[in-house]
Image (cartoon, grey):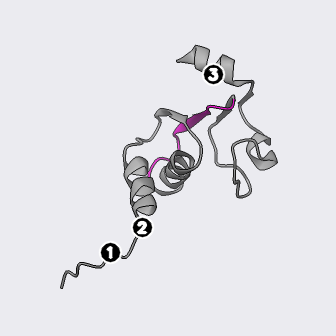
Amino acid sequence: MVTDTACYTLSELMVVAAAREIADREVVFVGMRLPLLGFLLAKRSHAPNAVGVYELGIVRDSPAPEPILTMGDLPNLFRAKWLSDTSDVMGLL
């Protein structure tokens, strides 16, 4: 039976929709907050080999070893493939 009451928020729906757009082995430019959560969900669910290029200047091919709230959190810097700054990352685009 379908009801009119959603069991999720619009933010949760956006995170899931973003995650579904990410394919395995794809290089993804990752923004803050909801896009970051979408990337992390994709890595853990169906795209473990996706590579994240974070707008802050970080490139990762594995999830941070601990939960992060922002891209600049220390666990996100630990064992990153590349640490730079925003202008270098924008140059990659």
**Disc 1 marks which residue?**
6
Of pointers 3 and 1, the one earlier in the residue sequence: 1
In the rendered structure, which segment of residues is drawn in magenta? 46-56
**Disc 3 marks which residue?**
89
| Residue 50 among magenta residues | yes
Q: CA distance from mark 3 to mark 2?
A: 32 Å
Any mark on residue 24, and which?
A: none
Confirm or deny contact between disc 2 and disc 1 (CB under 8 A).
Answer: yes
Q: Residues within 10 Å of mark 2 (few under 14, many from 20)?
A: few
Element under label 2? Answer: loop
Q: CA distance from mark 3 to mark 1?
A: 38 Å
Residue 43 vs residue 55, the one in the foreground? 55
In the orientation shown, which residue stands out farthest toward the left? 1
**Disc 2 marks which residue?**
9
Dividing the picture into quadrants, the one containing residue 66 is bottom right
Confirm or deny contact between disc 3 and disc 2 (CB under 8 A).
Answer: no
Q: CA distance from mark 2 to mark 1?
A: 7 Å
Residue 36, above or below 93: below
Residue type indicated by callout 1: Ala
Q: Residue at x 59, y 19 (%)?
A: 90
- Pinpoint residue 49: horizontal percent, then vertical percent: 53, 41
